[in-house]
Image (cartoon, rainbow, N blue to C red):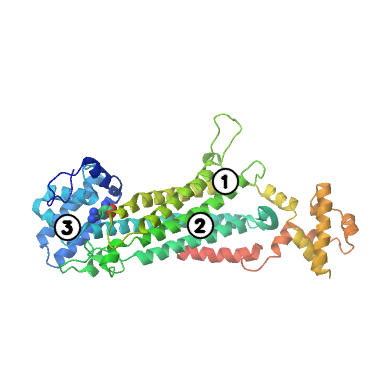
């Protein structure tokens, strides 16, 4: 049992208590950030004359050697230490002796862990943003390729009006764009350095917190030492943003599962992203999409868990907060994995344009346009609605689409119909007429694509 305290104790910690309390099994994940924070702290202490230059150099050398040896595998982070902070400090003292004992001057593990977690999260937010950006460029590519891939748009999962796959993919482009904006907002709000807040009430040493913050790339120090060690808002915000990303991925996964089904056949997932059945030889299952959908629950769970952990905590630090780590790490790793796999899955899936278009036709998605046709010829909309309702009934009886009706059939229901009805209700016309910004018409879509291209170049 290697721990940083013990002076005031007369008995050894019970082994079960020690194990229950220890966090090394998971906080070893941020050994790099812990060392980075210590380097900045020591550099600041020397600048302030709290450590000598020589002590600083010794400590920095020792920290560097620990980092190097952990990375090259010669120094293992074992459960013999209570947490990553103890591991680093104990190894430092082993390596450089007395100077190492000065590392923790003017610092508590409370501000240290708050810093480590922020540094770790900050790096992960950047990585998540990069993954989302890659997903967005693939979505933009799908949009460019499918401006005339007609398909049914749905409400209530009932065919509603014709759209294009570009338009459908564009909806997700907007969602993931907002997800990136959310991450950027969180980053801005969290980017203040808690180090120097001590256990809760600051320290009596003349620390230069502005300087430490600057060394670590923060926008400044946090402004209340109690809040600094007690704040986990940024993790809650992050878990909320991650939950939203998962909700988006899950909705899209659900659609892909439907599209890839035997009944729909709108898309075919690549063999490399599908799995088989041990018993049914014909099966090719969309397991990746299902797992992404399934893992959403796990990320929501992390958000609920941390909100609940935090709700009754008095200021300032409480050990309950150690519970923030495993679930945040798990949520981040889960989301990163899901974005990457989902990305690969949609980048390799085959789009069945013909099937999509015929599904749109056969679902009367052009019925609204047929009514608009009548309105343009002077029929009041409510009457037009009724006439087209009769057309649909007629088609259902014969198991045909509106496009398949003869002009005689049209005229038998309303004499207003002319030869130009076919042009008016073609998928192309129905989509092309929708030209307002945000609508599926090709020109409108092209304008959106140009804007989104510029967005990806600049942000
Ligand atoms: N392992 C602790 C955590 O994750 C580090 C802070 C410990 N501080 C303390 N006073 N016991 O929150």
* Secondary structure at numbered mark 2: helix
Cα distance in 3D space between marks 3 and 2? 44 Å
Looking at the rendered image, the quarter that the C terminus falls into is bottom left
Disc 2 crowd rating (10 Å Cα; few below 14, some 14-19, many 20+) is many
In the rendered image, the vertical position of residue 272 relative to residue 304, given as above or below: above
The reply, left or right, for residue 82 in relation to residue 436 is left
The reply, left or right, for residue 58 in relation to residue 291 is left
Disc 3 crowd rating (10 Å Cα; few below 14, some 14-19, many 20+) is some
In this view of the protein, which residue sits in the foreground, 40 or 14? 14
The reply, left or right, for residue 209 in relation to residue 259 is left
Q: Is mark 1 within 8 Å of ligand 1?
A: no
Residue 328's spot in the image, x, y percent?
37, 52
Cα distance in 3D space between marks 1 and 2? 16 Å
Are the residues at dot 1 and dot 2 in contact (C-beta closer than 8 Å)? no
- The label nearer to you, 3 versus 2, is 3
Give the residue at mark 3. 104
Which label sits on residue 136?
2
Q: Can residue 366 be seen here?
A: yes
Which label sits on residue 349?
1
Q: Can residue 77 be seen here?
A: no
């Amino acid at each position: 049992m290697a721990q940083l305290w013990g002076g005031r104790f007369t008995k050894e910690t019970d082994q079960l208590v020690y194990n229950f309390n220890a966090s090394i099994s998971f906080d070893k994940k941020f050994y790099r950030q812990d060392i980075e924070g210590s380097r900045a702290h020591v550099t600041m202490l020397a600048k302030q004359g709290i450590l000598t230059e020589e002590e600083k150099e010794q400590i920095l050398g020792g920290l560097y050697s620990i980092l190097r040896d952990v990375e090259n595998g010669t120094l293992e982070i074992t459960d013999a230490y209570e947490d990553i902070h103890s591991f680093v400090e104990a190894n430092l003292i082993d390596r450089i002796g007395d100077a190492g004992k000065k590392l923790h001057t003017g610092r508590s593990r409370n501000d240290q862990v708050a810093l480590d977690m922020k540094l770790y999260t900050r790096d992960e937010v950047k990585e998540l943003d990069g993954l989302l950006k890659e997903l967005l460029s693939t979505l933009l590519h799908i949009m460019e390729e499918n401006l005339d891939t007609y398909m049914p748009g749905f409400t209530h999962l009932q065919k509603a009006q014709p759209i294009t796959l570009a338009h459908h993919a564009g909806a997700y482009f907007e969602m993931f764009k907002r997800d990136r904006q959310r991450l950027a907002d969180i980053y801005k709000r969290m980017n203040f350095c808690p180090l120097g807040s001590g256990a809760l009430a600051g320290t009596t040493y003349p620390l230069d917190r502005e300087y430490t913050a600057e060394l670590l790339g923060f926008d400044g120090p946090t402004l209340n030492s109690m809040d600094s060690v007690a704040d986990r808002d940024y993790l809650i915000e992050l878990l909320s943003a991650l939950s939203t990303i998962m909700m988006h991925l899950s909705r899209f996964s659900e659609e892909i599962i439907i599209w890839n089904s035997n009944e729909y056949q709108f898309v075919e997932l690549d063999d490399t992203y599908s799995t088989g059945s041990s018993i049914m030889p014909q099966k090719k299952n969309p397991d990746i999409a299902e797992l992404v959908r399934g893992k959403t629950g796990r990320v929501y769970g992390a958000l609920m868990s941390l909100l609940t952990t935090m709700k009754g905590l008095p200021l300032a630090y409480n050990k309950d907060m150690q519970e923030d780590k495993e679930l945040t790490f798990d949520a981040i790793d889960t989301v990163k994995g899901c974005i990457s796999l989902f990305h690969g899955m949609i980048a390799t899936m085959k789009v069945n344009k013909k099937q999509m278009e015929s599904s749109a036709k056969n679902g009367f998605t052009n019925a609204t346009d047929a009514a608009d046709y009548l309105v343009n010829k002077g029929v009041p909309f409510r009457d037009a609605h009724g006439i087209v309702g009769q057309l649909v009934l007629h088609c259902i009886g014969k198991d045909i689409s509106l496009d398949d009706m003869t002009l005689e059939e049209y005229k038998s229901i309303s004499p207003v119909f002319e030869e130009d009805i076919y042009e008016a209700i073609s998928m192309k016309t129905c989509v092309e007429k929708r030209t307002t910004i945000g609508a599926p018409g090709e020109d409108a879509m092209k304008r959106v694509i140009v804007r989104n291209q510029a967005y990806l170049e600049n942000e």
